[in-house]
Amino acid sequence: MDIKQQVGANIAKIRREQNISQEELAFRSGLHRTYISGVERGVRNPTITVLSEIATALKVSIADLVC
Amino acid sequence: MDIKQQVGANIAKIRREQNISQEELAFRSGLHRTYISGVERGVRNPTITVLSEIATALKVSIADLVC
């Protein structure tokens, strides 16, 4: 599993634990749903600012997304 | 301080603690020295794969770079 896949799996896991849909996460983070889907599948290469927006939307730290 | 500046400051701090030059970090991470300089100054927006390469080069975790 490369780092993109690892981060994607972390985001999906945290999102599901919070019972949030990809649509809701997209809305909260100001990103497009298809982009969120791509990040979760590990096919996107998110920047630190995108990770910061997703972490804020999920109310977790960026470290939680990259561990 | 935004997240790019925070990550840049973390990288510069860790690099200096290890007495590594930007040139050496660039060589180890396979990135250009001017790009490393830009990341450390917070004017670049590194992706998760770039952060992974820098973390590996510094022998720290990505979480160490984003905290």
Image (cartoon, coloured by chain):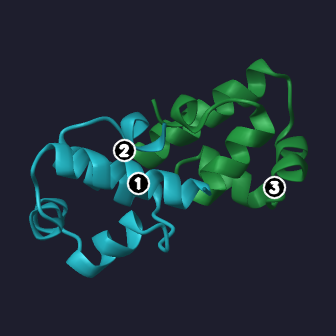
Chain colours: A green, B cyan
Residue A44 visible here: no
The residue at which mark 1 appears reads as B9
In the rendered image, which quarter is residue A54 located in?
top right
- Relative to B44, say whether A21 is above or below: above
* Badge 3 and badge 1 in a common chain: no
Which structural element holds mark 3?
helix
Q: Where in the figure is residue A1, as x and y percent of width and height? A: 37, 38
- Picture coordinates of residue B51 (x, y %)? 37, 53
Q: Earlier in the sequence, mark 2 or mark 3?
A: 2
Residue B1: x percent and y percent? 60, 56
Q: Residue at x 49, y 74 (%)?
A: B43
Q: Which mark is residue A53?
A: none
**Above or below, A6 relative to A18:** below
Secondary structure found at label 2: loop
To which residue does mark 3 refer?
A33
Q: Who's the residue at 58% across and 38% down the image?
A: A62
Q: Determine whether the residue tagged by mark 1 lies in a helix, strand or loop.
A: helix
Q: Is residue A21 left or right of residue B53?
A: right
- In the figure, B66 relative to A15: above or below? below
Q: Nearer the viewer, residue A30 or A61?
A: A61
Cα distance in 3D space between marks 2 and 3? 22 Å
Q: CA distance from mark 2 to mark 1?
A: 26 Å
Q: Chain of mark 3?
A: A
Give, as a three-letter code, the residue at label 2.
Asp
> Residue at image x 52%, y 33%?
A63
Q: Amino acid at mark 3?
A: Arg
Gap in angstroms between the C-alphas marked 3 and 1: 32 Å
Disc 3 crowd, CA 10 A, few/some/many (<14, 14-19, 20+): some
- The quarter holding residue B39 reads bottom left
Q: Quadrant of the C terminus of chain A?
A: top left
